Image (tube, helix red, strand yellow):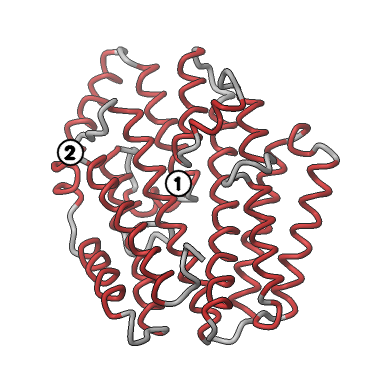
């Protein structure tokens, strides 16, 4: 396969996944903002959305204060924001158009129709009128694109590069969300390693009637994080107990059957890299395999003991390095 074609396929799926992840973050944050909150907490939650995508500086260059309306506009429709839903959908459609011959008719029509409907929704003010409906539409179109791709594409190199892009982007987003949410909780990114101790504290608080609002805040915070990755029902099936931070970290990092966990995403990346391997990709495959093996045999206690923030920062560095190596081995060089 030509490197230009592989590059377009890789980024086509990364951008549609990024648009969905942005919609997920904004939707959950919008729902959380309906709960009773002081002004500082509300501003911090919207600032976290910008931090996940590392957009604080670009946002501050255009807006003096952080407000829900401005953040929704900036992350939803701003063409100058590289991670806005508008920009990601446009880039996904342009990449799909460039490789129209490598896609099935159904896949191309799904991407093209999604772009045209997005323009209509933004023109009619759906984002401002009913942002929740707009975000649900974005998620639905992303699910549709993914399902049509899997259901109609031949299982060859084109599909493998699409999946590599999707799972690499998914791993990056899950790690960023975990890092920011735990950093919000602890201030320095260090997570409590002893979940049973926290559980006991929660039980004590319920018994004596103290800290009720704090417990509710903790519950809604972790519920929101799980909801943003469609993990709330999965958490209840796996643990059948109250939500604790260490279990949330374990589910989203190490659980092999959680579709948006770091392990599940990196396992898919490693398997598809093996399918498209060439003479230059040996080191890239080795690094992806090492990262996958560390996740597969890792323990959440060790991760939390060494510091979750440091662990996730290192993981994101390795993901970024892996993306660069994939570009060098298979795709159009980033400098091109």
Q: Mark 1 highlights which residue?
A: 232
**Circles 2 and 1: CB distance less than 8 Å?**
no
Question: Quadrant location of residue 277?
Answer: bottom left
Residue at x 57% of width, y 18% of height = 65
**Percent coordinates x, y for residue 100 in the rendering:** 71, 77
Q: Separation of disc 2 and disc 1 at Cα?
A: 21 Å
Residue at 37%, 27% (x, y): give it. Answer: 218
Q: Residues within 10 Å of mark 1 (few under 14, many from 20)?
A: some
Residue 193 numbered tag:
2
Q: Is residue 313 left or right of residue 232?
A: left
Helix, strand or loop at label 1? It is helix
Question: x, y percentage for residue 155?
Answer: 53, 86
* Direction from residue 294 to residue 149 in the image, left or right: right
x, y percent for residue 45: 48, 27
Q: Of residues 193 and 64, which is closer to you in this image?
A: 64
Vertical arrangement, residue 127 with respect to residue 281, above or below: above
- The relative height of residue 291 versus residue 121 in the rendered view (above or below) is below
């Amino acid at each position: 396969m030509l490197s230009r074609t592989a590059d377009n396929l890789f980024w086509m799926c990364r951008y549609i996944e990024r648009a969905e992840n942005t919609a997920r973050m904004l939707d959950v944050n919008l729902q959380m903002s309906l709960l009773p909150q002081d002004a500082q907490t509300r501003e911090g939650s919207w600032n976290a959305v910008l931090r996940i995508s590392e957009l604080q500086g670009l946002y501050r260059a255009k807006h003096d204060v952080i407000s829900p309306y401005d953040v929704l506009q900036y992350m939803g429709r701003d063409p100058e924001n590289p991670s806005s839903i508008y920009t990601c959908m446009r880039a996904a459609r342009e990449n799909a158009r460039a490789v129209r011959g490598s896609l099935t008719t159904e896949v191309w029509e799904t991407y093209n129709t999604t772009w045209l409907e997005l323009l209509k929704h933004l023109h009619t003010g759906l984002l401002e009128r009913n942002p929740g409906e707009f975000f649900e539409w974005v998620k639905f179109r992303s699910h549709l694109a993914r399902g049509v791709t899997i259901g109609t594409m031949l299982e060859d190199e084109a599909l493998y590069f699409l999946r590599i892009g999707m799972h690499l982007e998914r791993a990056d987003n899950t790690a960023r969300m975990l890092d920011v949410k735990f950093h919000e909780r602890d201030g320095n990114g260090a997570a409590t390693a002893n979940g049973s101790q926290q559980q006991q504290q929660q039980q004590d608080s319920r018994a004596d009637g103290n800290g009720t609002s704090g417990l509710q805040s903790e519950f809604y915070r972790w519920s929101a994080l799980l909801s943003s990755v469609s993990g709330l029902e999965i958490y209840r099936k796996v643990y059948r107990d109250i939500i604790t931070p260490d279990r949330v970290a374990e589910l989203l990092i190490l659980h092999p059957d959680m579709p948006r966990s770091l392990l599940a995403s990196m396992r898919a990346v490693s398997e598809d890299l093996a399918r498209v391997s060439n003479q230059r990709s040996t080191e890239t495959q080795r690094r992806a395999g090492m990262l996958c093996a560390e996740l597969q045999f890792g323990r959440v206690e060790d991760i939390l003991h060494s510091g979750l923030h440091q662990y996730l920062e290192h993981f994101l560095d390795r993901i970024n390095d892996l993306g660069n190596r994939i570009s060098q081995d298979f795709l159009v060089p980033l400098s091109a």
